[in-house]
Amino acid sequence: MSLTLLCAPLAALWLHSATAGEPAGAAQPAAAQDFAIRAAHAATGDGQHLANVLILVQGGRLAAIGTGELPPGIEVIEYPGWVTPGFVAAWGRLSHPAEDETTSPFLEQLDLLPGFDPHRPDVAEALRVGITTLLPATNPTSVIAGTMPPVKLAPGPAGEVQRLPLPALLLSMASPAVNRGRAPTSYSGLVLALDQRAADPAGRLAEAKAGRLLVSIDVEERHEVQRAIDWSATHGLRPLLRGATLAGEQIASLQAAGVGVVLPPFGLGASGRTLDALVALSKSRVPFAFGYGSEASFRLPLAAALARGADRPALERALWGGAAKLIGADARVGSLRAGLDADLVLWSGDPLDLSSRPERIYVGGREVYRAAPLLPSQPPKSPRLGVPTGNKHAR
Amino acid sequence: MTSLKLHSLLGGALAALLLTAGARAQGAEKSAPEPRRSWTIRAERIHTVSGQVIEGGLVRVENGRIAAIVPGGKGGDLSVHTITPGLIDLSPDISLGLSAVEEDREVTPEMHLTDALNLYSTRFGRELASGVTAVLLSAPDNNVIGGLAAAVKTGGPELLSARLLKPDAVLSGAFGSAPSRFNSPAFGRPQGLFNRRPTTRMGVEWEARKAFYDALFALEDKREHPGSRELQAVLRGDLPLMLQASATQDIRTALYLKEEFGLPRLIVSHAAEAWKEPEILQRSGAALVLPPFAWNGTTAVDRGFMAWNTPKLLDELGVVFALSGRGSADPDARLALQPAFAVRGGLAADKALAAATLVPARLLGIDDRVGSIEVGKDADLCLWNGEPTRFSSAVVGVLLSGELVKDPR
């Protein structure tokens, strides 16, 4: 047991792995085991921060947070950075073969889970961002794309897919779903077709009404958001609206309908209007979550919105606990709470600061990612790294 | 948005007060105060349209409705030259795009346009600023029978519940070249998955007649198919049918359809060349929507020619007609200018004004709420700086449901 508090985080990590007798390379994922993390900072995922928190992981789950006696002989990882739950992305475009199923725009019986391969490199890329749970996106041209549960972005101990219990029925009422290639070519036709399916007592939408399925509806523009709200209200559904970029301009409607939204990945060039909408959303009571687009851009809008005055606890809920609740997975992931899956990310600093990075990621108590070590004590060799070198002549 | 509008109308001091209130509450939507919906407006002339023209008087608006019309009187919050009802356009210049028409079939009477509306379209604001307070929105003319058109107000919150005047006001369709345009015959290259028919005017007519025969057979056999109920409602006269037909031959086709099936309520829209068929027109009892006037008479749909004296001629025949604004070669010649053009062609001023207000309201069956200045109706008002049927006049102010959306001051 290593109780020594070390200043350099990487040294601590190295020491830990050395004492645990494991290879530093993450090619072979470590088996789930019991351990504890003592971190300088923690974001709980519900908008709260803790200092000097002690987290006990037992059997792949969070056994205790902050208090309690440590079992004798347990290994403690001393970490001077931040510990958080893994991000929960409620929308994410991964190269998922079943996404491109276009045989029909109505595929309510299609199970999309077998098309998900956790070993693909883009899954690992999304994991590196700090996302451990994700509800994948589907082909936006399908009115009903099929059912898909949220999944963990790491394979299980036997290389298997790790899914969460509540599957989502994935609908689209966005413009790609109405195109001139096939029926429906219009929003009117789309609504009529969905109305007919909602009236079927043995259909998937009936299951959704009974609470056995989550309903997610892809939307883009504001009129599509409003149409989805109106349609859902007609059929007694409370869907998750995915892709509503300007949801912050429709807060009254969203609040009245009691539905949550998922913002699409903004990319690198999010406009001021988009960010202002995000700021407004963060100050409202509308539950929301984020979508994952690419490794480079996931946290960018967060930092930009924070700089514009967004409510930080709301952003944190949208990344963790609130997002998990929106996709019906809050009994398993999204917070630092005893009983939940030990999906943890160790951050070199504040996770909403773009200069921080995930250094270690655990899914179900198993280490699934370890960052290549930086060499912070040495000056970078290339000035392209953007760190001042102290050489005045370099300018 | 609401607070921005208020900003412009309440002036600096009050706006500053509102802004601080907004900042305190955080979140614009929660703090947006209800707009003022009670006004007293003085005018030198009030065109009630349904009744007399009042020379000098007050219109009192309370909680979004017209509360009183008082001849004479002094004071008032606003003073303008003329007040008329808000204009109503049955063929407005608001494009809904192809996502508003179901093109997998040519006859889709069961489609509701309310499901395809984009109330965030910036076109609404432009219509409203030009004095148009209510519009009929139909599916684009790609289908022979496009679906159920909706009557909506042009302003207010972007919610159907707030803007809808009548959801399924008419069943709309199109004759002429539009429904067959871009469609290719079976031996040609298909345009997509659907090798669409019809490809000729004959085919268009055939589709329309087949649709009504199918609806009649369905009635006889006591069965239903998509759209049969809507077509039967048209046959009974519960629902007006509005067909776009501009060239003489297309207008004739539409009028013969009315006679063949005994359709009680037919509205021919964009009826530029209706004046060429006075006898059939008079006999049929169909109502018309005229396209906007063009300097050389050539209108947008099928280059139908409309003479300047068309409204006068139709009035003499006793044909009911409304004026409209879509498809003008001049982007500014929208509905507000059309009554002046009609007067230029010889029509009486009061009839010209009615053709842009009360007549379209009656055709849609929304005249219990809008179309004229009467106590109890919605306070949708146009404020003019002169006589509305003169070219030198303009719409300087607009009230929508009592809210001053364009300030004349």
Image (spheres, rainbow, N blue to C red):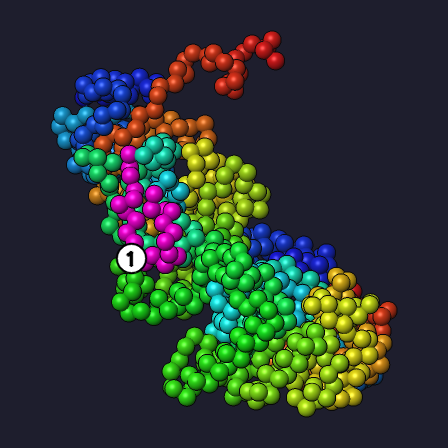
- Residue B31, x across and y down, in percent: 55, 58
Quarter of the figure with the C terminus of chain A: top right
Q: Nearer the viewer, residue B64 or A222?
A: A222
Residue shown at 58%/51% (left/top)? B23
Q: Nearer the viewer, residue A253 or B148?
A: B148
Residue shown at 66%/81% (left/top)? B252
Q: Would you place residue B138 above or below residue A25 in this image? A: below
Q: Would you place residue B179 above or below residue B213 in this image? A: above
Q: Secondary structure at mark 1?
A: loop
Q: Would you place residue B108 above or below residue B346 in this image? A: above
Q: What residue type is disc 1 on?
A: Gln
Other-residue count near label 1 (Cα within 10 Å), few / some / many at <14 / 14–19 / ≥20: few
Judge whether residue B33 can be spotted in this image. Answer: no
- Residue B285, x across and y down, in percent: 66, 88
Overall secondary structure of the magenta section = loop
Is residue A107 inside the magenta stretch? yes
Q: What segment is highlighted magenta in the picture?
A: A97-119
Is residue B325 inside the magenta stretch? no
- Residue A113, x across and y down, in percent: 28, 47
Q: Would you place residue B103 above or below residue A219 in this image? A: below
Residue shown at 68%/58% (left/top)? B7
In this view, the residue farthest toward the front is B187
Chain letter of the residue carrying label 1: A
Quadrant assignment, res A8: top left
In this view, the residue farthest toward the left is A72
Quadrant assignment, res A360: top left
- Residue A108, x across and y down, in percent: 32, 58
| Left or right: A37, with A380 as reference point | left
Quadrant assignment, res B69: bottom right
Quarter of the figure with the N terminus of chain A: top left
Judge whether residue A101 can be spotted in this image. Answer: yes
